[in-house]
Amino acid sequence: MQVGIVARKGDPRAASLASDVRDAVETRDAEVWIDEVTAESLGIGSGRPVSALIDCDLAVSIGGDGTLLFAARNADGTPVIGINLGEVGFLNAVPPEEGEAAVLAAVERFRDGGMNIRESPRLAASVDGWRSVPAANEVVVTGHRRGPGGGIDYELRIDDSRYSGGHADGVLVATPSGSTAYNLAEDGPLVHPAVGGLIVNEMCASDGMPPLVVDLDATVTVTVSDPAGAIVVSDGRNPHAIDGPVSVEIRRTEPPMRIAGPTADFFEGLKKLS
């Protein structure tokens, strides 16, 4: 069994915990490594690139939800267990004092063929052969800048039906896991992670419609009429500029994000937002 550990960059507490988890897992005769940035900070010089998570049986994320998303993006389907050093932790269910025990339990369950894994959908945008990096939270189609004089002129369709259109700063399509992230900041609805749907949310639309929850397998198409085009962003990263006029299709993609270990309490997480 191979276990890869990724710790929040520049966080001595996360790096120290990564070292402790590595030592604990090694006692179970598993191959285990720490990401190269954390290894360098610890002075052990034996880390690996985060992209190597794709070849692991289990990834361990130590930090906040952002660290887990970073690990999951590189793991691309490898189960990830999150040890929470952040403030909210909708995805990270394991407190730091229980980190070693939770990872060791996941290792043993993997060997027994019964590791507890739950799946969360990911999204991708596509345009004329280009495909975005998969997003666990949201894909955003936005103008080159927001506010007066910025934004996009657009038409928004769900499968083959027109839902809305006009002018807005952008359009956001989120997974249930992403409902508490950028979507919430744009006044979108909270959606329980057990709900099988996608959230479609227009951002500061001049004449738009309310946010909409659609089927998980729906195709959301954002057609931008402006020749200046738009920017497509996945989970706040990897912005990609596209010339207009253009139609951007957003739909569920495989593999999903796979999260190992105990389940976070969604409603406890909500209390930390207030």
Image (spheres, rainbow, N blue to C red):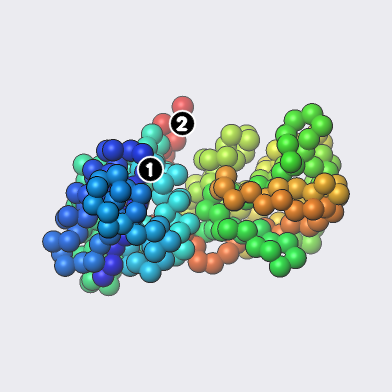
Is disc 1 placed on a helix, strand or loop?
A: loop
Q: Where is residue 229 in the image (x, y as percent from the top left)?
A: 79, 49
Residue marked by disc 1: 9
Q: Position of residue 159 (x, y in %)?
A: 74, 61
* Image position of 74 (left or right of 155): left
Which is in the foreground here, disc 1 or disc 2?
1
Residue at the (63%, 35%) spot, across then down = 186
Task: Report whether residue 21 is seen.
Answer: yes
Name which quarter of the figure residue 132 lies in: bottom right
In the current view of this chain or complex, which residue is farthest to the left? 27
Q: Residues within 10 Å of mark 2 (few under 14, many from 20)?
A: few
Image position of 90 with respect to 196: above or below: above
Q: Nearer the viewer, residue 40 or 235?
A: 40
Is disc 2 placed on a helix, strand or loop?
A: loop
Q: Indicate the amino acid at tag 2.
A: Leu
Q: How crowded is mark 1: few (under 14 residues within 10 Å), some or many (20 or more)?
A: some
Task: Report whether residue 213 is seen.
Answer: no
Q: Position of residue 208 (x, y in %)?
A: 78, 39
As measured in the structure, the alpha-carbon distance from the residue carrying label 1 to the one carrying label 2 is: 24 Å
Q: Quadrant of the N terminus?
A: bottom left
Image position of 169 with respect to 227: above or below: above
Residue at the (65%, 62%) spot, across then down = 131
Image position of 90 with respect to 246: above or below: above
Please give the label number shown on residue 273: 2
Residue at the (78%, 57%) spot, across then down = 247
